Image: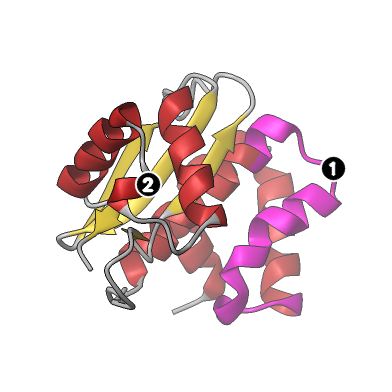
Amino acid sequence: MALSSDLEKIFPLTLSLLEAEESQRFQHEFEKDWGFERLHFFPMLLKSHKCPQKILEVGDYEYLQFFLQSQTFSAVSSGPHLQLNTSLQFFPLRSASEILGKEPGLYLLWKSAGQVQERKATFEEAQLLDRLREDQMLFEADLSSQEKEIAENFFAWGILQPS
């Protein structure tokens, strides 16, 4: 399969935002210089050509979707502390994206039960996620009552994994 057709499958919205000639030029340049195993660099190629932020954000989002769909993730059990889903990805959207149908904010993408899940994080959820990423030995007993409620939702949604 040609890399161009792979790019068209993985980045259809991104490529649709470019002029046809520009899209072909970027696909050809990427195929020549990078290759399939480096698909995550396609949005960076667009950035190096000074594409508008809205196109870059769509490219990043489409790559995250592809990455999560195409990878297998394993739960890592390393003790009784709270553990984030190993597939959890963060997608910050600076301004509204009509093509993605999203308002600005921090979006969480993860794989749970074989399906890609997504939600826009609230401020409180983002704070707890930041704390969980910083302190990888955090126990449920260390959480405030509000954080415990959020953690319960995270477990239900598959963002937190049982140890």
Residue 121 coordinates in the image, percent (x, y): 41, 31
Image quarter for residue 35?
A: bottom right
Q: How is the image coloured?
A: secondary structure
Q: Residues within 10 Å of mark 2 (few under 14, many from 20)?
A: few
Residue 18: quarter of image:
top right
Is 9 part of what is drawn in magenta? no
Q: Residue at x 53, y 44 (%)?
A: 130
Whole-angstrom CA distance, mark 1 to mark 2, is 45 Å
Query: Looking at the picture, which amino acid does disc 2 mark?
Result: Asp
Q: Who's the residue at 62% across and 75% down the image?
A: 38
Image coordinates of residue 106 in percent, x first then y, are 51, 33
Q: In the figure, 15 relative to 78: above or below?
A: above
Q: Is residue 133 left or right of residue 31?
A: left
Residue 77 or 35: which is nearer the viewer?
77
Q: Which residue matches tag 1?
A: 50
Q: Is the residue 31 above or below the residue 148 in the image?
A: below
Query: Tag 1: residue type?
Result: Lys
Q: Nearer the viewer, residue 66 or 20?
A: 66
Q: Residue at x 48, y 19 (%)?
A: 103
Q: Is residue 46 above or below residue 148?
A: below
Magenta-colored segment: predominant secondary structure: helix
Residue 9 appears anywhere in the view: no
Q: Which residue is mark 2?
A: 142
- Specify the segment rendered in magenta: 33-56
Asked whether 38 falls inside the magenta stretch, the response is yes
Whether residue 67 is visible: yes
